[in-house]
Image: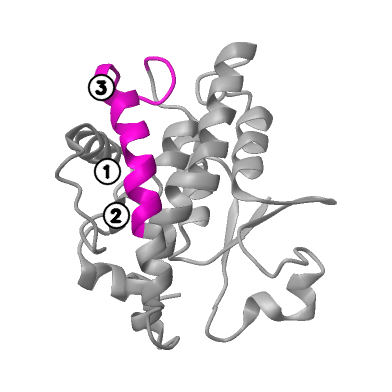
Amino acid sequence: MKLYTFPASYSGRKVLAVVDHLALDVSIERLDGQAGDHRKPAYLALNPNGLAPTLVDGSFVLWESNAIMQYLTDKAGSDALFPRDPRKRADIVRWQCWELAHFNKAFGAIAFETVAKPALGFGPTDEALVARAQRDLSRFAPVLESHLAARRHMVGEAVTIADYSVAALEGYRNAIAFDWSPFPNIGAYFNRMHERWPLPTQSAELRQDIKAA
């Protein structure tokens, strides 16, 4: 199997966490965003969106990070990361949908505009977009804070792919303009996930990591 991804992509990190957790034999092809690798015909033939990650498993090509995570865990037969129990599985998928549509959508927009853009020279920060994303993150962070009040993981008593999805941006928390102090449960959760799957945590480290892309 081969995985195409950007080194600094939070979506790619979600998949890489699963690859690492399950010790899967997956070849990693790191795309150079500044060189436009994701816009070249050969890559667009795999992923017409021109985005990453993309997984190639023989003749089967799959894009969308959460779908790739689910596929890899099923292929590996990992009932722990993605349980077969229909209620647990639905709960995991629910939180993956939520992070993608709400929490990490807002979190990621702030990170891109205030960290990635300056590091890559992609133009000025869109302050209006950042303001909207901050409002959205302020709206959805309490949902996660409340959910984590009496639990250590998103679903059940052990880490699942829901955790790798929700916590994928934790390395950016101290680099973005957002007040996390009202959310101690999220902070503790991010710390636990960082111990399991370390990501860069300081602005300078993040910029170096992004430029490596």
Of the numbered discs 1 and 3, the one sitting upstream in the chain is 3
Q: Main secondary structure of the magenta part?
A: helix
Residue drawn at point x = 31 percent, y = 35 percent: 142
Disc 1 crowd rating (10 Å Cα; few below 14, some 14-19, many 20+) is some
Where is mark 1, residue-wise? 194
Q: Which residue is mark 2?
A: 171
State the quadrant of the C terminus: bottom left
Mark 2 vs 1: CB contact within 8 A: yes
Query: Residue 139 sits in which quadrant?
Result: top left
Q: Which residue is mark 3?
A: 149
Quick check: 77 above or below 128? above
How far across and down, in percent of the image, does residue 83 sit?
A: 57, 18
Question: What's drawn in magenta, residue-wise?
Answer: 134-157
Q: Nearer the viewer, residue 211 or 3?
A: 211
Camera-side residue of 203 and 78: 203
Check the image and report above or below for 135 versus 164.
below
Res. 199 in view: no
Nearest the camera: 178 or 202? 178
The three-letter code of the residue at mark 2 reads Gly
203 left or right of 139?
left
- How far apart, in angstroms, are the residues tagged by discs 2 and 1? 8 Å
Residue 92 % position (x, y): 54, 26
Q: Is residue 95 left or right of residue 50?
A: left
